[in-house]
Amino acid sequence: MFIDELTRIQETEAKADQMVRDARSGSKRTLEEARTQAQKILTDAEGRAKEIYDGFISEGEKISAKEYDEFMKKTQADSDAMIAKAAAKKQQAVDLIAERIVNTSVNR
């Protein structure tokens, strides 16, 4: 009877030890799976962040190019207007300069 009780106690202790080993093994496995899953989530998030970043950069470049083109068109139009205005006054300026030269030469 005592030996039977002792045997059951030993068997119970062995089962408890095995349960502890199984629990440790299971927790290590679960922890590793969690780490793997966390790494996958991180990698996916980095990929999505890069896609979003690239999208913002692309959109910014499009807006910048459009604004640059609009600015250049306006600058060209302003430049053309100044050239036209200057051309209209060119003959007037030539006549004024010639008159001053003539007047300066005559008055000497």
Image: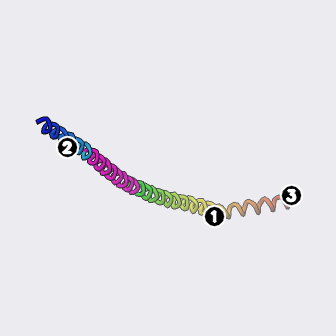
Q: Is the magenta stretch mostly helix, strand or loop?
A: helix
> How many neighbours does mark 1 have within 10 angstroms: few (below 14), some (14-19), or many (20 or more)?
few
Identify the image quadrant of the N terminus: top left
Q: Taking 6 as reference, is 40 above or below it?
A: below
- Per the image, label 3 sits on a secondary structure element best described as loop
Magenta stretch, residue numbers: 23-51
Q: Position of residue 67 (x, y in %)?
A: 48, 57
Give the structural element (helix, strand or loop) at label 2.
Answer: helix
Q: How far apart are marks 3 and 2 (CA)?
A: 129 Å
Q: Which mark is residue 107?
A: 3
Is residue 32 part of the magenta span, yes or no?
yes
Q: Distance between the residues labelled 3 and 1?
A: 31 Å
Which amino acid type corresponds to the residue marked 1 in the rendered image?
Answer: Ala
- Count of all numbered marks drawn on residues in the image: 3
Kind of residue indicated by mark 3:
Asn
Disc 3 packing (10 Å; few <14; some 14–19; many ≥20): few
The CA distance from mark 2 to mark 1 is: 105 Å
Viewer-nearest of discs 3 and 2: 2
Q: Which residue is drawn at 57% across and 60% down?
A: 81
Of residues 105 and 6, the one nearer the viewer is 6
Q: Is residue 26 above or below residue 72?
A: above
